[in-house]
Every structure is written in structure tokens, then in C-alpha cells.
Image (cartoon, rainbow, N blue to C red):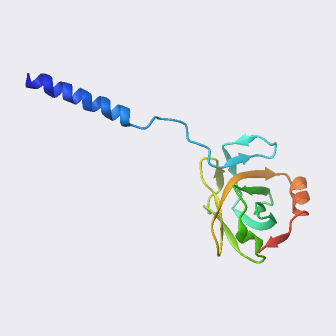
């Protein structure tokens, strides 16, 4: 009788553990990545990181990596610290040689709140130069 009770109890505990376990699923997209052709992709390779930055408005920034490839970074919402000219900022996480859509990226001003990134779009030189001509100022 004890063996029957013990095995029933073990089976119930195993079933409860399976029910309580989170469902296995695909990783969720946290940042939309778009390549030069306009297609959504899972990752974009950077060449040595970002080195130049222009402010379009307080929700859109134009970055360029060391190979002079342009990236339009769109924030989830307006970032008021970007309205102050001369405010330095960083792109996080940095030190990565590729952008991955399952990662959360953010803009971190030297002072003020961090700003979450919604979308990163890679652009060809012609479009990047065109967007760069519309920017408010370069951030050093």
C-alpha cells in the first residue's frame, strides 16, 4: 500500500512540475532589425562598432560604423535628453560586432533617462547621405 501511495504521489508531483514549467518557445524579437533591402532580419553585422552620430530629432538618430555604413536608429518614444545640444551619449550594449533582434538596445545620455531602441535600419550610402543632410546636428 505504501508503494502505491508513494508512486501516485511521485506521479502527481511530476505532473505538477510539467504544468508549472514555462512553455518552450522561440526567442521574442526585442529590436526590429532591417537590412539595406528593407527586409527584417535576425542579425546585422557591424564592422568594429559605431563611431559617428547625427541627431535627426529626439526619436531618430543616424549612426555610422567604422566602415562608413549608415544605420537609422528609431527609439520607442521621444527621448527628451536628446533635445540638449552637446549632450554626449552611448549605444548599449556596446562592444558587439553584430546586432541581434532578440537583444534590447538603448541610447544612454550622459545625463537623463535611458531611451529604448525600437528599430535599427541599415542604409546604403546614398540614402544615408540623404538622411544625414536632414539632421539637426552631429553629436561628438
| Residue 32 spot, x, y in % from top left | 69, 47
> Which residue sits furthest left?
1
Q: In the rendered picture of this protein, how many numbered marks are placed on residues?
A: 0
Q: Residue at x 65, y 75 (%)?
A: 110
Q: Position of residue 40 (x, y in %)?
A: 73, 41
Q: Which quadrant would the N terminus be assigned to in this image?
A: top left
Task: Tell me if residue 135 comes above or below residue 6 in the rendering.
Answer: below
Pick the quarter of the image with the C terminus: bottom right
Q: Which of the two residues, 52 or 76, is positioned nearer the viewer here?
A: 76
Residue 37: where, in percent of width, then height? 82, 42
Whether residue 136 sits left or right of residue 59 in the image: it is right
- Residue at 82%, 52% (x, y): give it: 123
Quadrant in which residue 82 is drawn? bottom right
Measuring from the top left, give residue 14's x and y in whole percent.
28, 31
In the picture shown, does residue 115 fall above or below 44? below
The quarter holding residue 6 reads top left
Q: Is residue 105 left or right of residue 63?
A: left
Q: Residue at x 24, y 27 (%)?
A: 11
Q: Nearer the viewer, residue 47 or 122?
A: 122
Res 47 quadrant in image: bottom right
Amino acid at each position: 500500500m505504501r508503494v502505491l501511495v508513494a508512486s501516485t504521489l511521485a506521479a502527481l508531483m511530476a505532473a505538477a512540475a510539467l504544468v508549472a514549467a514555462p512553455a518552450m518557445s522561440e526567442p521574442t524579437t526585442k529590436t526590429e532589425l532591417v537590412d539595406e533591402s528593407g527586409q527584417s532580419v535576425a542579425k546585422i553585422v557591424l564592422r568594429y562598432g559605431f563611431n559617428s552620430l547625427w541627431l535627426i530629432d529626439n526619436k531618430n538618430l543616424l549612426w555610422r560604423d567604422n566602415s562608413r555604413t549608415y544605420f537609422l536608429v528609431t527609439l520607442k518614444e521621444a527621448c527628451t535628453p536628446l533635445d540638449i545640444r552637446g549632450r554626449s551619449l552611448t549605444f548599449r550594449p556596446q562592444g558587439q560586432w553584430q546586432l541581434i533582434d532578440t537583444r534590447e538596445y538603448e541610447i544612454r545620455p550622459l545625463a537623463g533617462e535611458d531611451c529604448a531602441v525600437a528599430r535599427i535600419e541599415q542604409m546604403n550610402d546614398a540614402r544615408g547621405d540623404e538622411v544625414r543632410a536632414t539632421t539637426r546636428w552631429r553629436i561628438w
